[in-house]
Image: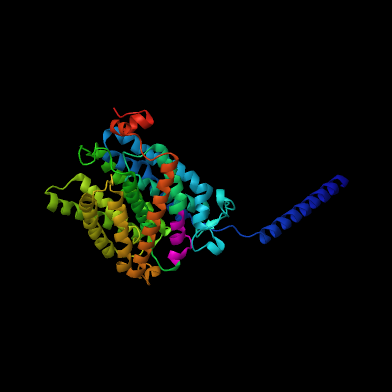
Amino acid sequence: MFTLNRHMRAAVGSLTLLGAFAGSAIAQDAAAPAAPAFDTGDTAWMLTSSALVLMMTIPGLALFYGGMVRKKNVLSTVMQSFAICCLMSILWMVVGYSLAFTDGGSFNAYLGGLSKAFLSGIDMNSATGTIPEYLFVMFQMTFAIITPALIAGAFAERMKFSAMLLFSALWLIVVYVPVAHWVWGGGFLASDGVLDFAGGTVVHINAGVAGLVAALIIGKREGYGQVNMAPHNLVLSVIGASLLWVGWFGFNAGSAVGSNALASVAMLNTQVAAAAAALAWMFAEWIVAKKPSILGIISGAVAGLVAVTPAAGFVNPTGALFIGLLSGVICYIAAVKLKHAFGYDDSLDAFGVHGVGGIVGAILTGVFADAAINEAGAGASVGTQIYGVIFTIIYAAVATAIILYIVKALVGLRPTKQEEIEGLDINLHGETVQ
């Protein structure tokens, strides 16, 4: 009996102790702030969108651009996209995200702060809306990757690799990051009512104008207008354009930052505008040049994708249709006719497609914005959109020119004439395509 009583007393004591621990744990849980309730559907869609947008640069843009250059420069062109992807990823993590998407205090209208440099302060419970903030960092990183990569199309086949890396790094911090903050990070363009759903201003006008400035400052390719500079492999370009098209669903529909009706209409608008622009470019070329080309139809598709980007989450499908049709014709004129009329060498039509397409799309967003699709577009104004376009063009042009002259003074911009004639693949990278 003594032994039994002793065991009973021990059991009662253990239960009492366990009860005390349980009560303490419950009290701590009650006092601790609840972890954010991430939406699994939104998170899954944004994980997918991030992968899709990364695919736009590697391998999409790499193949699209790589197929359009001459055989002696294909590896250097593909290398540019791949190296930019690596470099921009690190710069975005270290400082780019913080400067674009944090509060800059008294300077917040123009630039964010450094409170999240190296992603400081972000943890597993940090949220952006209904998704983890780490995921939002990744999604926005893919935009920061593709934008400087687009610029490379304007100076393809004639820029030193070292100069390209230095230029891209400086351009991301000095040009892309501030404009992203102005539009998406709480800066003055957003406050003034400028609409840009997925990057017409931040990505395409920014990159297209920078590309034009680079083409003018660096100068024409050796033999431009005198030797055959036809694309060496349009099959690669078609594959690249197709990857860009599919990846663009992440670009535009992903900018809804959720798995919802807005993402759905943005995806549909993207498809409609791309198809309409591809047909518009094809028929315009068919009428003018008498033959529809594969280069023309894929260029038209990209033009439509560019133009609908700022509008994807603000317009209805009918608006997207008109944006696609108009951008296809206007970008055809810019890329084929105006380039030759003014004599500049925009190698792969970075300005003609991305710059002009971005401008067309940004302005038409003010025309076709539908409050029934997105209440944020209720106050859309063509005048406000033009104001945003003009400000971005001026800033991108001036800042890009300054950066290029700094790079020129530090490392030079072009390889030697002989290296350029022989090809950048063998001279800059020691490799060739067999």
Question: Which quadrant holds the C terminus?
Answer: top left
Answer left or right for 241 relative to 101: left
Q: Vertical placement of 51 versus 33: above or below?
A: above
Task: Say if residue 365 shows up in the picture.
Answer: yes
Judged from this view, the residue extending furthest toward the right is 2
What x and y, as percent, mark residue 317? 28, 63
Judged from this view, the residue extending furthest toward the left is 290
What x and y, as percent, mark residue 180? 44, 57
Give the total number of marks visible in the rendering: 0
Region in magenta: 177-190
What x and y, as percent, mark residue 182? 45, 61
Judged from this view, the residue extending furthest toward the bottom is 379
Between 185 and 212, the one lying in front of the other is 212
Between 61 and 159, the one lying in front of the other is 159
What x and y, as percent, mark residue 431? 35, 28
Answer left or right for 41 relative to 152: right
Q: Quadrant of residue 157?
A: top left
Answer left or right for 372 relative to 284: right
